[in-house]
Each structure stands twice: as structure tokens, then as C-alpha cells.
Amino acid sequence: MKLRIRPLLLSGIFIALTAYGIMLVSSDRLPVIGSVRAESGVTPARVAELASLDPPDRLRGAVAAYYGGHFDTAMDVLERLVTDYPERHQDDEVVRRAMLSLLALYRESGQYETALNLLNRGEYVDDAARLNKWAVEVSYLAGRPEETLEHFSAVAGNERHTIEPRLRLFAARAHFALGEHDAALELLGSILDTTHHMPEAYRLLGELHAAEDRHRDAVSAFRSARSQEPNLTATLLPEARSRLELGQPEQARSLLVQAERARPHDNNVRELLAQVEDEYPAIVETEREEAERRRELTAAPLVDYHPEDREEIERIRVGLAESLGELHLKSSSDWEIELLDSRRRSARADGEPIARGRAEQLLRIDWNGESIALSVDGEPVLTHRLADGWIRMRNLDEDGTFILFDMEHSRGQFSAGSEDRAYRGALRFGPSTAEGFTVVNELDLESYLYSVVPSEMPASWPHAALEAQAIAARSYTIANLGRFSSRGFDLLGSVRSAFYRGYSGESPRTTRAVDVTRGLVLTVNGTTVPAYYSANNAGHSDRAADVWGGTVAGMSSVADPQLDWDGRPRRPDELLEWLTDYPDSYSATFPFASRNAYRWELWVEAEELVTRLGDGIGEIYSLRTSGRTPAGRVTAVTIEGSDGTRTVSGDAIRQRIGGIRSNLFVVEPVFTPAGSDNREEAGDGEEADDGVDSAGSLSEEQTLPRAFVFRGGGWGHGVGMDQTGAAGMASVGARVEAILNHYFPDAEITAAY
């Protein structure tokens, strides 16, 4: 994306308003922008000089400050703009936009009292319906359920059961907060009768039924919530509790095991799981016996297809698991194990293996501190000191595979689970950086892609999209070879590199896509680029440099062809509306787009955030975004608590801040009915009373946020190719070249081999 620079002369200083933020430089030279990030080279005090500009430039400057991470400065400029023009003025439209932007910032910062006062003014806003809807939302978020219902009645009138479902859900929450369960149930019923997708409504319904001891209904509601939004893993624990009330300990334990994998930070889950296993040991023993029988009866498959001339294709090492204590596996053919030297060749001069075995024997590898011990059908066969190097296990039949049992995956994500997975090629075993041992799959690159493409994109999607995925995945793989060499492998088998399920996940349609594009990669100036991709970019991708920093060639910022975007960053109110709406785009094309991937909403309890963040934060006072990319993705989040302040940046935001799907979100605090504003700010001056005493604790009349609501779009980092968008483009006839040219406009398709 080309930068648009608009220099403004201000007190001997040029202000460059760009898609990436604000830069202030001396007037004797203009800046060379290049890949300048928004938060560099500017201080809030200097940006505040924008207040002396004309209204249009003030508004642009405030938006740039917001994207540059100067939240308070943006709010100050907008406040002065709205205050300076209280009467009708030729810049009415600019002031109207400034007021809407200011409202959005008040919402983000939890200054709901001020927001409600501004809503009651509304001189420059002729969209009364929009303001009334915001009043319903803001009053609830402020912890004022009675006022929420007053605003809701004013908006709904006689259409209480037909008005926008989102507003009905806020009203239902207000009734629930007031203990008016029947009224809440009535509204929830009207929502779910007329709306096919409202997972948060099912979540609230489950909480309501559980509160009334209707546990069978609660179970049904919680399951419906997760069927619509699998990321609602917070419902696993309350459903498990309801299952226990219904006398279903086995189902409760299954839910708790799932919750422990998806939410390893949750102490309440671990405590209840331990309690259930102590009270019902027979359940654990039965599961162990069933696992043993499954391993005995399951056979490893034989490969029925190989890439042509695969001996000539580069071999790669994929890290399947680290820090393992034990592993059960089988081979579909006879096998042997060899000791490797530093060059990954046999360390024995005679080339003889150090162990051999037959097909379908049940193998077990155990870690005992310094060594791994291999047993075959229960009999000890080999003990190997990890300090002596890596060992490699290979099939003697080229069609053989290894099946690894009970492989845990995606820990810490809602998709976390365990499954048996078969793999082509060889296996390597060696030391982990921590305790335990590491398992690596070694195979040729094209065979690896046979699994990666269907693991990353459904095999039923259009061929052009599958071919684009194959080329992007091949490019990413080649560009990242050796990335984890210090840990004994090239790439991870998880989404940190590419999702890789092994031979078990292959499909003929995707195998064909890999074969058709054999050796093709994306290059810039002859160099293979790491062609990033993610599930859904919400309609707008970002440059890699803006998301992760540094310089990555070929990763441009592009908007979906169906979206009407003029190249400027969206104002705060526009961003909020854009993430709340469901605009048409290829990223939203049915049936490829999951509704929860394109647009989503997640309510996260403050207590959960504290456990995710760990020690050093205490009770949370505030959570605020601290900078955005041109498309609106959050680059950093600052959390202020009773014990200190924490800043979380980059990809860590998704995991550490609530397990959200992407960094493209707006977040707002939710207060209890006992209070409203948390830390109402009077401005940047020293006399501002922010509700915090000198020791850093809240004053008595203030309350802490009990939760935070994230409204967002997209799934993943949002750099490079949008997998859903690629399928949407392919569904209307776009060929692989057109798809890749859209997402990687600076790259070209080249044959690497």
C-alpha cells in the first residue's frame, strides 16, 4: 500500500499524516517515511499542538494519534474540537464525526458517565436511532441495568420482541442482573426464536437455567453456545458443574479435561478436575483400559501414493512434540533405529542400526531424566542417553507409516484436543530444551504439503483456492527452513508454523493441488518470500512490518475487492461500527466463511484475565489498546492493575488477553451494577482526579471492571493471504494467479524446482 503524506505547517513543524500515524519533524526537511511505525518519533505533548489546526486537520490528527498509540492525546484533541464549536458551524459534519469518535473513545476507556452526557447532548448527530442504541449499550456496560431498560423501552416501544436482537440481549442481561429471570427468559426466547446465530444469548440462557437449578436445560444451552462459537470455552466449567448436579460424573470429567487443555490457566478447572478424579477413580481407570485396547487394535496405515522423484526433493524436519514424558506408537512395516551424528548421518562406521523391530508391534518410549527407554510389546529393547545425540527410526518399507497415539495438539486454544496421527517418512527422537524428549517427523517437502494444505484449508473448497494455499504454504516452508534448528527441527507441526496432521489428514483433492503446483513459490526479486496466510482477515490484511515489525518483502496491506475503502484509517466510531456490522466481502462468502471467524464478540471476565496474565498485575483497573495498524489491528494492550502495569504486544495478545481470535478488535470494560465509571479522567493536567490515591488503589466510590467485551473481526494474524477470501474469490471464477496477485501484489510466481 502506498503511503499518503499530507504535510501541514504548524509552528515551524511539518506534521505528516500518513496511514501509519503521525510524524513531527523540523520544517527544513520532510521525512522519509518508508516503514515508519506509528508509535515512533512523536510525543503526546507535541501532537497536542494539533488543537490549533482547522477542524478537518484536527480530526485527522486525532485519528492518527489514536492509531499511533496516543489514546489520551487523541481524546484531548477531540474534546477540544467538540468544545470549541458548540454552535452551528460550516464544519458541522467534521464536528459530528469528531463527536462520534469521542464517544467511541469514551466507551473504550470506560468513561461511561461522560459518554452518556455526550449522548444526551447530540447537537451534531442527526442519527437519533444510532445514539439511542448506543445509550442502551453504554448504560449496561456502565453497570446501570435499570437505566438500560429505560433506554431499551424508549428505543423498542411496542416492538420489544422484534427490535434488533443485539439490543434485546443487552436488555436480557439487564433483567438478569436485576434478578428478573422471567423477563430475561422471555427476551432470550424471542431472540433465539428469530435469530439463527447468537451464541452469547445461549451462554446467558445457560447461566440463567443454572441459577434456577434447571441443570438439564443449562447443559443444552451451554452446548448450543459452543456449537455456534467454539471459542466460548468459558462455558465448559459451568456445564461440568451442571453435569455433576445431574449425576453425570463421566461427562463432567470429559468436559473438564477439554477445559484444562483449552484453558490451562484456569485454576478452577484444575481443582474441580482433581476433585472429580479423586471421587470417581473408576472413570480414570476405565479410560486407561480403553486407551490400551485402542492402541492394541489400531493398525498403522500404508501410503498409497508418493510424489514423483521424491528422492530429489529437499527433506524437512517437523517438530511434532516437545517435553514428552512418554509416547506410544506403531509402524505399518518392519523398522530400525540408527544413531545420528551432527550431520544427521549414521554415527556408526558400519552403518548398522542399534535396534530393529517388526510391523504392528506396540512401542513405548519413556523419559527417565537423562535417557529414553524403548520397549516393544512390553519388553525392554533400548536405552539411549539423550546427551549422546539424536536417534532416527525409519520404516524399511517405503509405503510404511508410523502412528503416534494420543497426540495432544493446540493446547491453550479452543480447538485443543488429542488424537492418533499417522505420519509418512522417518521419526527422530532427541533432547528438549526443557525436561522430556522431542519427537520430529522427517520427510520430503511435497509429502509434507500433502498434509499441510488440507490441514489448513478444507479439501472441499474450490481448486483455485487449494492451489493458492499449496503455493503459499510451499513458499512459507522454504523461506522458514531452519527457523527452529536450535531445537532440532525446521518447523513446528502447529499453527505457529503450519497446522500439520500427518498422513491422517491427507485428501486426494488437496494432493492434486500440491501436485499441480509442484515446486511453485512466490518470490520478490528472486527471493522466496514467507507467504503468510490466516483463516480470515475480516476483509482487510496488514503489512507484516506493521504487525510484527522489521522488514518482510511481499507482504502488503490490501482490502477485500468488495469493500469500499478509501485508504485512510477508520475513525474510532467507524472501526467500532465496522466490527459490529457484517459487510459483504469475499472474506464473508457462504459457505466458506464461519460467522465467528469474520465477526465475533467475546465477553471475558476480569478474573480470567488476571489468571492469564499471571503474577504482577493484581486486580485490573483498566485495559486499553496502545496502537493500531492501518487496518485497525491492535499492536499493544496496556493493562493497569493494583500490583502494577503490564503491556502485551503482537501475537501474544490473542493468547494472553482472553483467547480472542485476532488482534482486530475494540474492547470495552463492563462494570457491576454497583458503579459506573472506573477512573473518569479530567484531562492531562496534574489536578485531574482519576479516582486513584497515591498508593495506586481505587477510591471507595469507584468500582473495578468485572469483565471486558471484545468486538472483533477475523481469525489469525491477518497478514498475507486470507484463506476464506481466497475461497470466496475462487467461487466466482478467480484463478490461482488472480488470487495470489491480490494478496501478494508485489510478488510473482516462480518455479523453485
Image: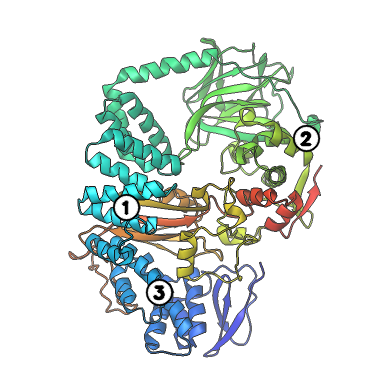
Classify mark 3: residues with Cα within 10 Å, few (<14), some (14-19) or many (20+).
Answer: many
Mark 2 and mark 3 in contact (Cβ < 8 Å)? no
SS class of the residue under badge 1?
A: helix
The percent coordinates of residue 121 (x first, y second) are 32, 79
Q: Hey, what amino acid is under mark 1?
A: Ala
Q: In this view, does 239 lie above or below 284?
A: below
Q: Say which mark, if any, is on residue 226.
A: none
* The furthest residue to the front: 158
Residue 696 visible in this rendered orientation of the protein:
no
Query: Which of the two labelled residues, at mark 1 and mark 2, occupies the earlier sequence position?
Result: 2
Q: In this view, does 321 lie to the left or right of 477?
A: left
The percent coordinates of residue 14 (x first, y second) are 57, 84
SS class of the residue under badge 3?
A: helix
* Among the 4 quarters of the image, the one containing residue 144: bottom left
Quadrant where the image shows the C terminus: top right
Q: Nearer the viewer, mark 1 or mark 3?
A: 3
Classify mark 1: residues with Cα within 10 Å, few (<14), some (14-19) or many (20+).
Answer: many
**Residue with the mark numbered 1:** 606
Foreground: 726 or 647? Answer: 726
Q: Nearer the viewer, mark 3 or mark 2?
A: 3
Foreground: 527 or 463? Answer: 463
Q: Hey, what amino acid is under mark 3?
A: Leu
Q: In this view, does 705 lie to the left or right of 25?
A: left
**Residue with the mark numbered 3:** 102
Question: How far, Cα to Cα, is label 1 from label 2?
Answer: 51 Å
Q: Is residue 415 left or right of residue 116?
A: right
For the point 36% across and 50% down, which residue is it? 191
SS class of the residue under badge 2?
A: loop
For the point 44% across and 90% down, which residue is it? 89
The percent coordinates of residue 657 (x first, y second) are 41, 52
**Residue with the mark numbered 2:** 313
